[in-house]
Every structure is written in structure tokens, then in C-alpha cells.
Amino acid sequence: MQTLKYGYMTLAWIEQGGQMGKLRNIGRILADAVFPPACPGCGQPLGYKEGAREQICGACASKLIYIHEPRCLKCGKEIEKEEAQYCYDCQKQEHRFVQGTAVYAYTDVVQHSIYRFKYQNKREYAAFYAKEIRKQCGPQMKRWHPDAIVPVPLHISKYRKRGYNQSELIAEILSAILEIPMDNRLLVRSRKTIPMKELNNEERVKNLENAFICTQNVVKYNKVILVDDIYTTGSTMDACAKALMDAGVQEVYYVVLSIGKGF
Ligand SMILES: [Zn+2]
Ligand SMILES: [Zn+2]
């Protein structure tokens, strides 16, 4: 432990090397060797593939199910051919948002990964998630011509307990790599809500009534993309979209890492 501590201090010293880029690079390489990044799927240390550090291990990569066409024109969920343009959920229910898109189906590997990301302080997964979103949904996001990316907020008490908002971590990196400004102050969760997984669709909507508020009365954005980790029934996105539209946003879209099958 002592060696690790001193090793870490040396790395920190090298990292602080200022203009000496070479030393900084050596610092990164050493840090990478001492603390290899973990697979965002299973949490095991990552190896190398074709001379570069893997982003996800082969076993987990093979279990990811990407969302393909045909997609629901509203929520972005993959649909069966007989469902035509909209999924069964979106045929039954109107949404406040204009359209959304997602990277993965909500399978076990994604569920476990998001669990560690949210509850076990695996903040570093955000970089992998953001790159996956850019790869799968970046062109669609650009076509929406957004003025800002807005993370779905946590209630302040949850934020303090967790120490971070997982959606904001993803939104921050997405904003940088897609060059779309992020606004993480616009929307706040003003009320604590019951965990959604315990509720049915109607209860979810009720649970979220007036749960979000805009910090500005007149919002200067026409189009906003919400960012969240999971989409289940859309009640969170609708509640956020309502708050944004009440404050003057014209069109609300969303991007999520994973989308469930719906009800
Ligand atoms: Zn893995
Ligand atoms: Zn749908």
C-alpha cells in the first residue's frame, strides 16, 4: 500500500510537470499500467487489442445489443415491422417531447454497467458511454439542430449523497465531443420522488407531477436535447419536456444510453 501511495504521489508530481508534456505522457502511461481502466461491462481490468487499450472487453462487447432500424419515430425504440411507424407504447400514449434516440437495448450487461456507474462511483464509464452515443446517435443529434444539451437532473439530496449526477457526466463529455453547449443549471428536480421501478405507468406520471422546474422563466433556447441513462416509459422525459416548454423551449428531444422494452 505504501509503495502504491508513493507511486501515486510520484505520478501526481509528474502530472503536475506543467509544460513538460513528455513527462505528463509518461505519467499517464505509468498510471494506466498501475491502475488499468476497468471494462464498463463487467468491471474487470481491460487488456490491449491491436496495440491499443480496449474500451470494453470482448465478452461484454459481444453481449451489447445496439438499437437498429426500424425504430419508433417517437421514442426511438426498435420496433417490429407490424408496428408501422410507432411502437405500441407510443401509439397508446402522447408524449411532450418531439423525438428521442437510444444506443442499447436494456440487457443484463447494460443494466449491471449502469448500476456500477450510478451506485459504485464508476464515473469513468461516462467517457465510454458518451463515445458510444456519439457513434450511434451523433448524426441524428446534429440533425435536430439543438441549442443546448441538458442532463436530466437529480434532486439535490440525491446529488449530495451520490456526489455526482451520472447523466451530467455523460452530457458534459457529449457536449465537448459534439460541440453542442451543455446547460446543467436550466432544469432542477424540485421534489424528491419515489424510485420509478416500483411504480406502474400512471403512478410514474403522478409521481413526477411538478417534479422538475426551470430556473429561468423565459428560456432562450428553441431546441434542447435531454440526456439520461435509461428510458423506460418516457414519463421522466415528458415531465422534463413539460417544464422546459412551460418556460418557452419550442422543441425537446432526448438521447439515452439504453431503452427498455416498455410495457
Ligand atoms: Zn467486460
Ligand atoms: Zn415509441
Image (tube, grey):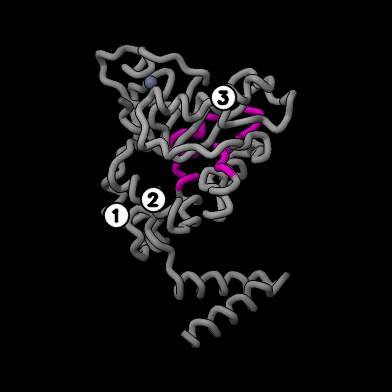
Viewed as shown, does residue 233 lie left or right of 225? left
Viewed as shown, does residue 32 lie left or right of 13? left
The magenta region covers 129-155
The circle on residue 115 is 2
Q: Which residue is mark 1?
A: 58
Q: CA distance from mark 1 to mark 3?
A: 38 Å
Return the residue nearer the eye: 173 or 120. Answer: 120
Return the residue nearer the eye: 173 or 55. Answer: 173
Query: Which is in the foreground here, disc 2 or disc 1?
Result: 2
How many dots with numbers?
3
Image point 29% across, 14% down: which residue?
83
Q: Amino acid at mark 3?
A: Ala
Verify CB contact (< 8 Å) between mark 3 and mark 2. no
Return the residue nearer the eye: 203 or 63. Answer: 203
Verify CB contact (< 8 Å) between mark 1 and mark 3. no
Residue 118 at x, y percent in the picture = 45, 51
Q: Secondary structure at mark 1?
A: helix
As drawn, 186 above or below 93: below
Q: Secondary structure at mark 2?
A: helix
Q: Can residue 217 be spotted in the picture? A: yes
Q: Any atom of ligand 1 within 8 Å of the CB at mark 1?
A: yes
Q: Amino acid at mark 1?
A: Gly
Image point 42% across, 39% down: which residue?
195
Q: Which residue is mark 3?
A: 241
